Image (cartoon, rainbow, N blue to C red):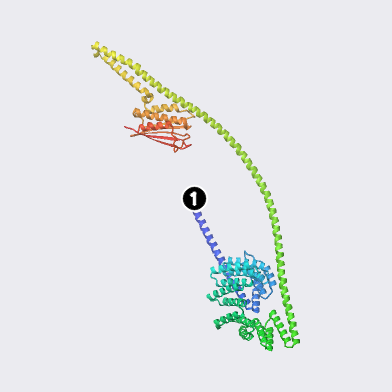
Amino acid sequence: MDIADRYTIFLVRITINVVLTRCRIGLFVLLGLHTCEAVAQSTALQRTYARSTDLVERNDKVAMGTFLDSLRNYRDRSETDRVLFHLLDARWMRHTGRNLDAHHLFDTIAVDTLRLPLFLIYLRHYQHAKTLKAMEVFDMARVEAQKARRAAEGMKMLDEALEMDLLISEIDLHNDEFERALHGFDRLLERATALHHTEGICRALTGMGNTYYHQEQDSIALGFYQRTLDTAQAHSEPELMIGAIHNIGAALTYTQGSEAAIALYRAVLDTAGPGMHTSLRADLLTNLASMYSDIDEHAQANAVIDEALAIYAGKHDTASMAGANLFKATALWELGLRDQALEQVMLARSRTAETHLQARAAQKAARYLQAMGRPAEAYGMLAEHSQLADSLARRKYSDGVGKAQVRFETAEKERRIVQQQQALERTRAEGERRALQRNILIGSTLLLGIIALLLTRTIRSRQRLAQKETELHHEQVDQLLSQQEIKSINAMLEGQEKERDRMSKDLHDRLGSMLGGIKANMAALEDRVEEMRQDQQYQKVNRLLDHAVGELRQISHDMAAATLNRFGLEKALKDLRETLHINGRLNVELNTFGLDDRLERSVELALYRMVQELVSNVLKHAKARELSIAVTRSPGRLSLVVADDGIGFDTSVPNEGIGLSNVRSRAAALSASVHVDSTPGKGTTVSIECPVVE
């Protein structure tokens, strides 16, 4: 690859990295925009819901109708707007007492959890849960409240999640599941305490008190109500304080009597003074008047209820005014002020549009008119009461029918769900059966394939085993031949050495003695033939005879290692190489350097014997195909290296043979060092470094 190609690849990589970086940035921007859009949409939904909540709490029917009409015009603009309109419409139905219609509308709202905002999903389940609770369908209400809680947690709306915990526990309380309700309120108290959520703490304590109150354990309930009041006072929460006071008053009425409740209400009213919120003050006054009536202090009750009526009138709260008028009528009647009592009843009848208050007013008016001797008017009021009571009964019956209808529809829906689940189960079972058949077929095929593979591998293994056995047999034969060759070579070398020793002894003992005798006889003749000593021919013969004796001694001495002593180490190694080399069986390579000058005879002989020992080890053990002998002489040193490509051995295992020990002994005699390098399967190299005296 040339420079141009590398540069092109470099540019391509840079371009790809830039494109990927821009894609990541674009993705992050899109995600950020989507998140901002979702947050803005959720904020707008919360504002709309808060507006509807304000209208519901004020019971402003006209404004609420106008508000729903404005939403109706936009309901087809998007799925979110459509669902929001139906949710708020169903909520208003529940508020106006049309619980069954509200339930049906909630039930028809299809919640797409993938496309709709979580806030709408939360509202749908929350409002449906409250509707079902009002219809006393508690099991379904609990399920819906749990779904609403999960949606609130998904939006990290902690207040709403606590509200759902409270609603679930209240549902359990109304369903007489007291133990589960207590557990839920206790868990809510722990969470609210951890979050420092004052309202959650107070409502949890109130719920626990109500649970014991419903079980007629008023003393325990009073303790929880007192804890609620203490917490509300510590955090300056007046509305929570008033609620706690109402509950304490009710509990005191049953535990200590009405006088204790009256003392409590008086203390609170006197302590709070005019700064108390008017609605809360009016509620406390109404409760106080009720306590006075319980102990037959009707004048006090009448005075207190007048103060409450003034507050309700200032707020134009006609429903509360009607209830206060009926209460005042009872006090006036007990005080003997019958005309004024009847007037209060008629005021209540004319002020309220709520059926149950109208029915109470008509019944009380009929009773008062009858007692006052006005039977015709009393009959008219009684007929009106009957008509209103029938309306209430029909509504109650309708609520009962609606409750039964909801339960029937729920059972029918569950039956359809069960049928669908059974159909899915059958489909799944059929799919599993087919999958099992397919898996069995695949498994059988794989098993047959594995068996065939194993058979093939077994046959091949047996073939390889037979081949290895054949090779092993050949190796054993080769090894036997090698051993035989080694024995032959060693015998030949040993025979040569013995023959040379014998010849040297014969030459020294026999021919040497003969030449010595001739020399002695020549010396004896010198005394007798004095003149011959001066003869040149005689002197030449004598010199030749001396030279022959010397040569004989030299030949006798050198025959101990004939070739080595005669031609030196290099020629002896070459003869050894020619003896060992066998074409196709053992390739012997000899390399020498710096052996032109002879070494000391003892050094050459020791080196030659070490080479013989190492070569003998190769032939006996190495199973080598290649053998290398290298002798290098440098100033002051001589290096001998014998290497083979045989089987090698592990040098870390202390298992050194006699041959290698002999080599080390001969090397030590020369002050030489021996290094053995061998690895199993990778041959052996023996290096000998010997100092040489020049």
How crowded pointer 1 is (Cα within 10 Å; few <14, some 14-19, many 20+) is rated as: few
Residue 686 to residue 177: above or below: above
Tell how many labels.
1
Where in the figure is residue 586, as x and y percent of width and height? 47, 30
Frontmost residue, 93 versus 144 = 144
Quarter residue 593 falls in: top left
Q: Position of residue 477 (x, y in %)?
A: 52, 28
Q: Given the current orientation, which residue lies at the most extreme front position?
A: 256
Q: Nearer the viewer, residue 1 or 515?
A: 515
Q: Residue furthest top?
A: 528
- Relative depth, front residue between 10 and 416: 416
Asked if residue 117 can be seen in this view, the reply is no
Question: What residue do we see at 41% from left, 26% from top?
Answer: 575
For label 1, the residue is 5
* Placement of 436 over or under 641, stated as above or below: below
Above or below 46: residue 445? above
What is the x, y in percent for residue 68? Answer: 65, 75
Q: Place residue 295 in its image quadrant.
A: bottom right
